[in-house]
Image (cartoon, grey):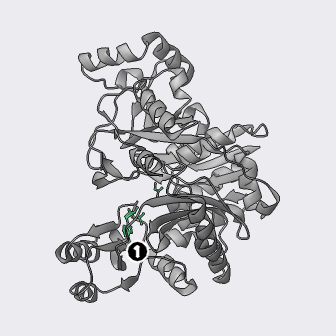
Amino acid sequence: MKIMVVGGGGREHAIIKKIKENKKVEKIYALPGNGGIAADAECVNIGATELDAIAEFAKTNAIDYAIVAPDDPLVAGCVDRLEAIGIPCFGPRANAAIIEGSKVFSKNLMKKYGIPTAKYEVFTDMDSALKYLETAPVPTVIKADGLALGKGVIIALTREEAKLAVISMMRDKQFGASGDRVVIEEFLEGPEVSVLSFTDGKTVVPMVSSMDHKRAGDGDTGLNTGGMGTVAPNPYYTDEVAERCMKEIFLPTIDAMNKEGRTFKGCLYFGLMITKDGPKVIEYNCRFGDPETQVVLPLLESDLLEVMMATTEGRLSDISVKFSDKHACCVIMASDGYPVKYERGYEIVTDEETWKHIYVAGAKLVPAGEAKHGTQGEVANAKRRIDPADVETWKKNVVGDGMALVNGGGRVLGLTAVADSLKEAVDAAYSLTGKVYFANEYFRLDIGQRALGAYARK
Ligand code: AMP
Ligand code: GLY
């Protein structure tokens, strides 16, 4: 089979590595992929939102099955386009992807069908929003309606901060047209749990739960990012919580989407908060999470491609989807300064054994002469930790002669370890960080600590 994966981050790399395990897969194309994915798939220089070019490529290359991973092509109708030319896809159509594409849609859906979520009001007019805030309880949460690359959510501790957030979204268009409508909602408290699920619109199969670490700094400080690390399973997702989620959230959501004529097929991601009144939905995503996928898929024992195709074909109830009872931890190595300002172009070095545990989020292949390097001292230090001979073998076998792999984004690599206990998985993931080096690398030191604390208190 010829498979096409739309997207080019760590999540896509994890998906590609997993579907490669299926013997029927002859060829995988990644659009656009990245410098690291290039070791596992053929990268094609077509952006994930270039729908015309994607459809054209799929047709010309007789693609048998497509996986559309990121939110923006899904919301823009990539699956609809591919299905129209007869290519089966993993992912929801645009009319269902709206569950992530519009917060107003998803909040109204939850209200209409009694799915537990934070109380909220929607505003299309700035003056009414500001007036509402004069008496609204604080802290409060302000959300821009559309996709804002995970940045359209502001938690305001005071009324003043809330007003400034509304002004920056609605008047100054900080998140573009996404700010034409804002949701102002109740601030919820409790641990957060991510649950990705496979659903064909009839059956919903939750994957192993996970915990993201969204803030840039240790101890959950600093700016919100795309995610600095994850662990799975999430200790706050107990059997009792899971049972309530299935009954009060997962099945009602699938039903609600069907009743609205918007059957959801693909990966539906439930961002949950376990409040003292029970689990509530913080957000829905219409796709695999990043970097949740980097801990969830390594624990999947079933064949991912088979599960995906069963999802597309409406056969989920006929197959069994198995996860191991091990633990996984993913530590994101980012470029220092992310998510604000950072430098790219520094050479990444590692060895082949470590490479097996790496999902590449943002890296580019360039001619070796163009790569930048750290100071002599830093490089010498890295050489003490990573055997230069092993680096050479890795370069020869993975990167290619005369080329260098350089950091090409804010989030650069995800280092994932799987072990029998969370403690061992966390330790192993952190040992991997010692076996990878690039100048200006930055990673949080406390990924998994909160989860370990939760286990300790059990
Ligand atoms: P979202 O982009 O919707 O995932 O929101 C980003 C983050 O903001 C979430 O992961 C939560 O940590 C936080 N958040 C969103 N909505 C709420 C809420 N109603 N109460 C408390 N925190 C929230
Ligand atoms: N890690 C959060 C997300 O993928 O939205």
Q: Residue at x 45, y 28 (%)?
A: 432
Q: Residues within 10 Å of mark 1 (few under 14, many from 20)?
A: many
Q: Position of residue 8 (x, y in %)?
A: 51, 46
Q: Residue furthest right?
A: 318
* Dot 1 amino acid type: Asp
Residue at the spot of label 1:
145
Relative to 323, does residue 199 appear above or below in the rendering?
Answer: below
Residue 17: x and y in percent read 62, 38
Q: Residue at x 30, y 67 (%)?
A: 154
Q: Quadrant of residue 151?
A: bottom left
- The kind of secondary structure element at disc 1 is loop
**Can you give x and y, in whole percent of width and height, for residue 34 in the image?**
50, 39
> Of 400 and 327, which appears nearest the observer?
327
Please identify the residue farthest to the front as the structure is shown: 458
Q: Quadrant of residue 352?
A: top right
Q: Position of residue 325 (x, y in %)?
A: 64, 44
- Relative vertical location of residue 219 with respect to residue 118 in this rendering, above or below: above
Is residue 8 visible in the rendered structure shown here? no
Q: Quadrant of the N terminus?
A: top right
Q: Nearer the viewer, residue 279 or 70?
A: 279
Rendered image quadrant of residue 69: bottom right
User: Which residue of the protein is positioned furthest toward the top in this rendering?
Assistant: 389
Q: Is residue 370 above or below residue 246?
A: above
Left or right of 383 in this view: 378: left
Q: Which residue is farthest left?
A: 160
